[in-house]
Image (cartoon, rainbow, N blue to C red):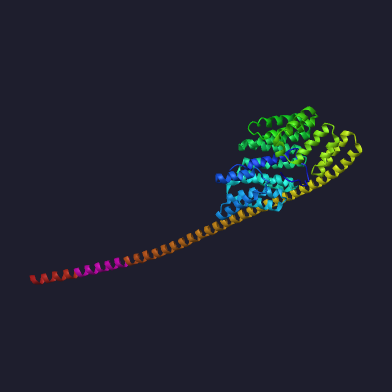
Amino acid sequence: MIPHRSRLFRLALTAVLLTAALSAAAQIVNRLGVNDSVFQRWAYCRMQPYDAGNLAFADTLQKVGAARENYRYEALGLALEFPVRFAQDDYGRMDEAVARIKELLAPYPDTRDFCYGVINEYCQYLIHIGRASDAMLEARAMERQAGEEHSDLGRMYAHRIIGLIQSYRSNAHLAVQNFTRSAEYCVSARFEQEIPNLYLLIAQEYIRMGDFDRAAEFCAQAEAYQEYFPSLRVKTRMTRAYLFNAQQDWDGFWNMYDALEADPLYRNVTEDDERYGLDVAYLQSRGLFREALARADSLSTARDRHERKHGIYAAQGSFADAYGELSLLMSAKDSIYINVQNEDMAILDAEMNNAQLRQDAERLKARNQITILLGFLVMFVIAFFAILFSQWQLRQNLDEMRRKNEQNLETRRVYHKMLESKEAENATKLQILQNRTTNRLTGYEEYLNL
């Protein structure tokens, strides 16, 4: 059981019950694929997430994981630890444990579903302690990552958290929109066990809006899953009880209240404030105003106490007391409103900073692309001119070779002409010599014939 703590807000009528039960159910799946015996012991501890005795096993898992360099064991230990730290109001250690889980699992896509489940539970705790702005930033980051990775499970968790935040801020229409989108992603992710719980959250928002027919419709849709998920019985009965109370269907409300009181699960899985709130409504509907006022004083938040007591005093005709409680309630609501505005500003600042960072990153990316492009362009120009210079040098070399060849050819032609001239001269001389020889022989023959 979670100890009493001051809250800056009042969640949906049974949102705490639904979120606490669901966060455990979402985690008790062997998403990290560890040894069966280890997982079974871990799952048993997760059934009692706020038991301080879990810290010993969590410490063992972390030490074994660190010694063996097994990030899965270490993540399991941290996931077992941070709910206990929440119950102990050790929020700094809770934050550190979740941050370490995200750091450990970030490089491993196959562990992403486990990590989404951890962030989902962590965000619910952030809402409990009034850090809705931090929860919104976590949910938005998870939504972006899940969108990039096309993870319907991650988007389901993200919209569920955003729906709870919008519910706490009394934005019922936005809460319904996000719960509806979450249910659609449930179907895509084949995570049907979450769907009835989302239907009940939607039903509670319709009760707030006074649309009782739609609230009854979603209650009926959730009840259709009871044979598959028996623990839904308490959740659907509580939602039905609030619906009957809002409709002033007293017989239906009293019967449902009696059925809850007779159910052993009712006291085991619900927080004190949820039961006290239902007790106040029951006693007031029975006309037991003194008892209702005493039970209202047991509520842990001033806002809830003033709101309940204002309704009780008004119902019994004590208008001066009702006015006094209303004044105190308005003061509490003003404080909550200021806190909500501060959270809105924090979220807006963070989102603007994130947008600025994204713009800076885009500008840097564009600058880098331009630099790379210019680099390629310079390299191309250098290569182009190098090729042109090489071509020019080649052409110059070819021209020089051609000129030298022509000179050689010209020299050879002159040489050949000289040879031809010499040969002609030799031929002439030979002819003259032959003629002289012939003449002499002829003269000698003539001499001999005398």
x, y (%) of residue 70? 56, 52
Look at the image and tell me whether residue 310 can be seen.
Answer: yes
Seen in the picture, residue 413 relative to 330 is either above or below; the reply is below
- Quarter of the picture containing the N terminus is top right
Residue 165 location, x and y as percent? 73, 42
Q: Nearer the viewer, residue 49 or 139?
A: 49
Magenta residues span 417-434
Q: Position of residue 153 (x, y in %)?
A: 63, 41
Residue farthest to the right, as pictured:
320
Task: Based on the picture, tell me whether residue 424 belongs to the magenta stretch.
Answer: yes
- Name the side, left or right, on which 26 lies relative to 247: left
Horizontally, is 183 left or right of 418 in the view?
right
Residue drawn at (89%, 41%), measured in percent from left and top? 324
User: In this figure, what is the number of numbered marks?
Assistant: 0
Front residue of 376 and 395: 376
Note whether 431 is above or below 388 in the view shown. Answer: below
Q: Is residue 109 magenta?
A: no
Residue 221 picture location, percent across and down: 68, 30
The answer to which image quadrant residue 41 occupies is: top right
- Looking at the rendered image, the quarter that the C terminus falls into is bottom left
Q: Is residue 31 visible?
A: no
Foreground of the two, 318 or 105: 318
Q: Main secondary structure of the magenta part?
A: helix
